[in-house]
Each structure stands twice: as C-alpha cells, then as structure tokens.
C-alpha cells in the first residue's frame, strides 16, 4: 500500500493508504493514486453476481473508482462491450482495439479467457468517477496491466454460477 499525505494547511490530502490490490487483483498504486480524491477513509468493496465482479473503491463514502470483470458475448470487440458500461465517448485504442480508453475510463478484452459452454469472453473495465484528474496514458497502463493480471487469475476459468 502507498500512503499519501499532502503537506500544507490549505491543501486537501489523502489521509489513507492507496491499495495495490483491488478485490484480489493487483494494481499499480502509483498509477491509481492521481485518480483518487483527497479524503480520510478509503473502502474497497466487491460486488459479485453471476458472470460479473465489480470492485468499488470509495473515499469518505463516495464512489471514486470501479473495476469490472465480466463475461460477455463472445466474438465481439471491446467497443461493443464498453457501450454497455458507459455513455462517454472513448476515442483512444491500443492493441488493434483490444483496449479502448479515455482520460478517466478504460476497457479491455482478455486474450484467452473464453467460456465455450456459454459462448462468452471475459472483459475488463477501470473507471474513475470522483477525480478532476484525466490521463489517457495512465488509464491505458492501468487497463493493460489489470487485464493481464485477470488473465493469470482464477477469474479466467469461467463465470461463477
């Protein structure tokens, strides 16, 4: 965990430790930090339903960041998936559209996480809600590393029933 406290009486500070694991998936705390608002307390809470696992990060009770791992219709691209996740325009992409991102959101598609039984593939998402910070390159790095870690996790084994 990375603890961040700003100096100076007029500045708001992050009086909490920034996690380097969100609901079982490692993240880069230094990349995550700028997307988190100042505050006193941070909470990381999973919300799991069949086929989808959200991880909500709240600061002082307000949603700041959300990650998602969800099984979605196979044979589609990441742009198709993200339309179910956000109404914001996403203009940046990497790896031939496997990753689509903006300054505050990013979505990806795993390479080999496929559930043949249900014809689904595993997609990922990373969204910042409560920050004035926008950094498309940081979002790209977050979603690429998050997706790679998901691919190496039990989440890749198939949707939970």
Image (tube, helix red, strand yellow):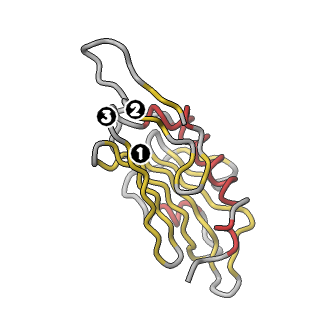
Q: Nearer the viewer, residue 134 or 46?
A: 46
Residue extending farthest to the top is 8
Which of the labelled discs sits on residue 43, or is there none? none
Q: Residue 8: where, in percent of width, then height?
A: 31, 12
Quarter where residue 1 is shown = top right
Q: Count neighbours of disc 3 (C-alpha within 10 A) and say few if under 14, some if 14 to 19, many if 20 or more.
A: some
Q: Nearer the viewer, residue 65 or 92?
A: 65
Q: Residue 89: where, in percent of width, then height?
A: 42, 50
Q: Nearer the viewer, residue 144 or 12?
A: 12
Please report the residue visible at 36 percent of the width from the left and 14 percent of the height from the top: 7
Q: Mark 1 or mark 3: name the one nearer the start of the chain.
A: 3
Q: Secondary structure at mark 1?
A: strand
Which mark's residue is nearer the viewer, 1 or 3?
3
* CA distance for labels 1 and 3: 15 Å
Which mark's residue is nearer the viewer, 3 or 2?
3
Q: Mark 1 or mark 2: name the one nearer the start of the chain.
A: 1
Q: In the picture shown, does residue 115 fall above or below 139?
A: below
Pointer 3 residue: 39
Pointer 1 residue: 128
Q: Secondary structure at mark 3?
A: loop
* CA distance for labels 3 and 2: 15 Å
Please report the residue visible at 69 percent of the width from the left and 53 percent of the height from the top: 148
Q: Is residue 114 left or right of residue 146?
A: right
Q: Are marks 1 and 2 in contact (CB under 8 Å)?
A: yes
Q: In the picture shown, does residue 80 fall above or below 133?
A: below
* CA distance for labels 1 and 2: 9 Å
Which of the labelled discs sits on residue 133, or is there none? 2
Q: Residue 39: where, in percent of width, then height?
A: 31, 34
Q: In the picture shown, does residue 101 fall above or below 6?
A: below
């Amino acid at each position: 965990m990375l603890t961040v406290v700003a100096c100076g009486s007029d500045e708001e500070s992050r009086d909490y430790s920034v996690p380097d694991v969100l609901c079982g998936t490692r993240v880069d705390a230094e990349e995550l930090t700028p997307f988190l608002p100042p505050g006193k307390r941070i909470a990381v809470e999973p919300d799991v339903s069949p086929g989808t696992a959200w991880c909500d990060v709240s600061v002082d009770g307000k949603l700041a960041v959300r990650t998602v791992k969800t099984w979605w219709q196979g044979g589609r691209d990441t742009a198709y998936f993200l339309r179910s996740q956000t109404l914001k325009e996403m203009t940046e992409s990497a790896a031939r559209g496997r990753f689509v991102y903006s300054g505050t959101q990013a979505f990806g598609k795993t390479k080999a996480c496929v559930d043949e039984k249900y014809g689904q593939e595993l997609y990922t998402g990373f969204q910042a809600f409560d920050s004035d910070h926008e950094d498309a390159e940081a979002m790209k790095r977050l979603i690429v590393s998050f997706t790679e870690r998901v691919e190496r996790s039990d989440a890749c084994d198939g949707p939970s029933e």
